[in-house]
Image: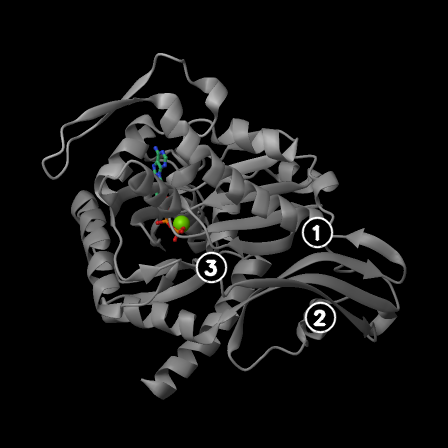
Amino acid sequence: MAEQIVGLDIGTTRIHAVIAEVNEQGVIEAVGIGSTPSQGLRRGVVINIEAALKAVNQAIEAAEMMSGREVASVVTGIAGAHIEGINSRGVVAVTGKGREITREDINRVIDAAKAIVIPMDREVLHVIPQEFIVDDQGGIKNPLDMIGIRLEAEVHIITGSVTSAQNLLKCINRAGFRVQDIVLESLASSRAVLSDDEKELGVLLIDLGGGTTDILVHLEGAPYHTDVVALGGSQVTSDISIMLKTPIDSAEKIKLEYGCCYLPLIGEDEEVRIPGVGGWPAAAIPRQELCKIIQPRMAEIFNLVREQIIRKDYLKHLGGGIVLTGGGALMPGACELAQGIFGIPARLGIPERIGGIVSEYKTPEFATVMGLLMYAAETVEGRTPVSAAKKGSTAMDKLMKWMKEFF
Ligand SMILES: Nc1ncnc2c1ncn2[C@@H]1O[C@H](COP(=O)(O)OP(=O)(O)OP(=O)(O)O)[C@@H](O)[C@H]1O
Ligand SMILES: [Mg+2]
């Protein structure tokens, strides 16, 4: 029997809801998609519950209409400048019969790695094992049944602000839906667009959103670095609005129709029509001029990301290159500009692994919501949850308990 799963990506500029079916083989088929402008968020975080819940309802209603189904629970994403990723390590002694490593030992060593001091106002969202070390042998992905005396685990811990997560939960609950799981948005996008080979070789995912740019580095198959740059596509639009003295919505239209962030891609004779506003006549400017407004901002975003990656010394470990997702990745020239700034290949991250959707939705904007569906599919009852999703739901349980106590 196929089960219903729902992914809900509440972004700063757009909300995407996708209803899908997952069968026993784990094949996911989307049956309804809703995508509406967002409200009540700032830089990835809910700041007005009433406004945000209306927008959530609109997106879910649109997906319900398309599919003729009803939504009861969702898997949602979380993002924002409050998200932090840290690497930690834990050690335990293997004490069981024959010194064989059991599931219990693995849970204990992950708990030991998790036992770091986390401020009261932060919540653990994910604990993802990177590698296990048995005695002195490192690089082990699954130590179950191995024999050893000492078991070590290296993990990536992702934490977020408790209040941000609560506001997100409250918003979705008040809209009338149960939250089955909360997943870091960049982890969800990674799930949807990165190949195992890329993760193994080392890959930098850059999610160019409206309010923020989220980054996630995978090395040797696991996440090692999570970060957020507090700049996104909205800044590009507001630059255009200021420089061309045109209102924000007209600047956004100009950006979507004529925008490009890499000068060599534009011919000298290409022109951009700027509609007349407030009695001013319509005008035309060379498209290269528009690019000269957009490119520096996009370059600033990529340079901020590059600085972080260099600070952590990860740049030379990115054999799998760069993958761009989020609406901002649709800007012509984004891959070329990234490639120039980082000096390694960059490609678009297109979610291809979900069936039942038309090509219109196979774009980098839908990477997060499609990844959320993949997480949702793994936590459907009866299927073995992956460690990350499982840890995510543990954090959720805690949050839920907190919510019940306080609201
Ligand atoms: N074709 C396009 N060319 C350039 N930019 C685009 C294009 N389509 C969308 N964008 C930009 O992408 C941004 C929205 O991306 P996305 O939907 O991924 O953001 P979000 O998820 O709502 O925001 P966040 O992830 O920051 O919370 C907007 O700034 C929008 O202008
Ligand atoms: Mg987003």
- Foreground disc of the pair 1, 3: 1
Q: Where is 351 relative to 290, above or below?
A: below
- Foreground disc of the pair 1, 2: 1
Place residue 111 in its image quadrant.
Answer: bottom right
User: Dot 2 corresponds to which residue?
Assistant: 113
The type of residue carrying mark 3 is Val
How has the structure been colored for display?
Answer: one colour
The type of residue carrying mark 1 is Arg
The residue that appears at 53% across and 26% down in the rendered structure is 336
The extreme left residue here reads 279
Looking at the image, residue 279 sits to the left or right of residue 392; the answer is: left
* Callout 1 secondary element: helix
Report, in whole angstroms, how far the alpha carbon at label 1 lies from the one at label 3. Answer: 26 Å
* Callout 3 secondary element: strand
User: Dot 3 corresponds to which residue?
Assistant: 183
The type of residue carrying mark 2 is Ala
